[in-house]
Image: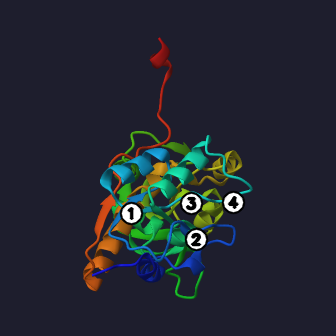
Amino acid sequence: MQIMLADFLAELEQIVPRGLAESWDNVGLLVGDELRESHSWLLGLDPTLSLLEEAISLGVDTLITHHPCIFRPLSFVHTNTPAGIFLEKALTHKINVIACHTNFDSAVSGVSDALAALLGLGDTRALHPVDSSGEAGLGRIGKYTDPLSFGMFMARVFEALGSDTVQLAGKTPENVQTVALCGGSGSDLAEDAYALGADLYLSAEIKHSTARWAEDAGFCIIDGGHYGTEKPAMALLKNSLESLVRSRNWNIKIYESSTEKPAFTFINKNTFS
């Protein structure tokens, strides 16, 4: 059975609707041909050269990333720059590139749902809803049936993020029951989390001014890093796409990147001693 990329894009709309994307964003098919047959997909967070090389090595025809490879309008494409090399190589190898960015952030079963699930939260709803249902929207706020000690909660955080370090601002609570979070850059939602009665807020790229506000408010904010708070979402997206493929009886191979890793590494002064 031939599966055209256009068929997949129509079905993808049901999982990550384009209408949920922020007005400034760029989502959907960014490179490629929707009238081309598709047989295999690779999922990754970032449209990097290493991810594209992984796609080429696997022989896939479509790359699905969270962050878009073309974000702002292009005035030129210089093929001696990382962005230009990426576009030239994708076109040369006829690899379609699709972005599911802020529409995946706000979608039901989206980026923040993946993180909430790993933390074991229940009764979750959107932190910043975009419709009357309260399900779709940025971030999530949820609860534990029984409170956890802060130490027990942090053990879950480190496990979910796959990291040994986070940054923390404000006053740490003794117990944690209501948790607000936002995968990726969520500094602007910190005050919403506080107003809704969360015991703490977990996100990434927390602004210095927001951290200072948390100190004065006596509210705990945890910065878990952009990669760590978003990476779990790729497994969730893979599961959603696998369900789609089964329901349509499509013969599609779906891969999640096995080579992607955090952009930053942590060092300390002992590294140079």
How far is mark 4 from mark 3, CA to CA? 9 Å
- Residue 178, can we see it? yes
Q: Which residue is mark 4?
A: 72
* Amino acid type at mark 3: Pro
Secondary structure state at the residue bearing disc 1: loop
Distance (Cα) linking label 3 and label 1: 17 Å
Q: Is residue 170 visible?
A: no
Q: Secondary structure at mark 2?
A: loop
Q: Do the numbered discs 4 and 3 sit on residues whose CB atoms are within 8 Å?
A: no
Q: Amino acid at mark 1?
A: Asp
Q: Secondary structure at mark 4?
A: loop
Query: Where is residue 142 drawn, in percent x and y?
Result: 44, 70
- Circle 1: is it few (<14), some (14-19), or many (20+) Cα within 10 Å? many
Task: Tell me if mark 4 has few (under 14), some (14-19) or many (20+) residues whose alpha carbon lies within 10 angstroms of its own.
Answer: few
Mark 1 vs mark 2, CA separation in Å: 44 Å
**Quarter the N terminus occupies:** bottom left
Which residue corresponds to mark 3? Answer: 68
Measuring 35% from the left and 79% from the top, which residue is drawn there?
Answer: 3
Say few, some or many: other residues with alpha carbon within 10 Å of mark 2 (under 14 / 14 to 19 / 20 or more): few
> Could you say where residue 178 lies in the image, as x and y percent from the top left?
46, 66
Instruction: Examine the rendered structure and indicate whether residue 19 appears above or below residue 56.
Output: below
Which is more foreground, mark 3 or mark 1?
1
Please state which of residues 119 and 97 is positioned toward the viewer in this rendering: 97
Q: Looking at this view, name the residue that lies furthest to the front.
A: 92
Dot in front, 1 or 2: 1
At which x and y percent is residue 165?
44, 39
Q: Badge 3: how crowded within 10 Å, few (<14), some, or many (20+)?
A: many
Question: Closest to the observer: 129 or 243?
Answer: 243
**Circles 4 and 1: CB atoms closer than 8 Å:** no
Query: What residue does disc 1 label?
Result: 61
The residue carrying mark 2 is 196
The span from disc 2 to disc 4 (Cα, nearest Å) is 34 Å
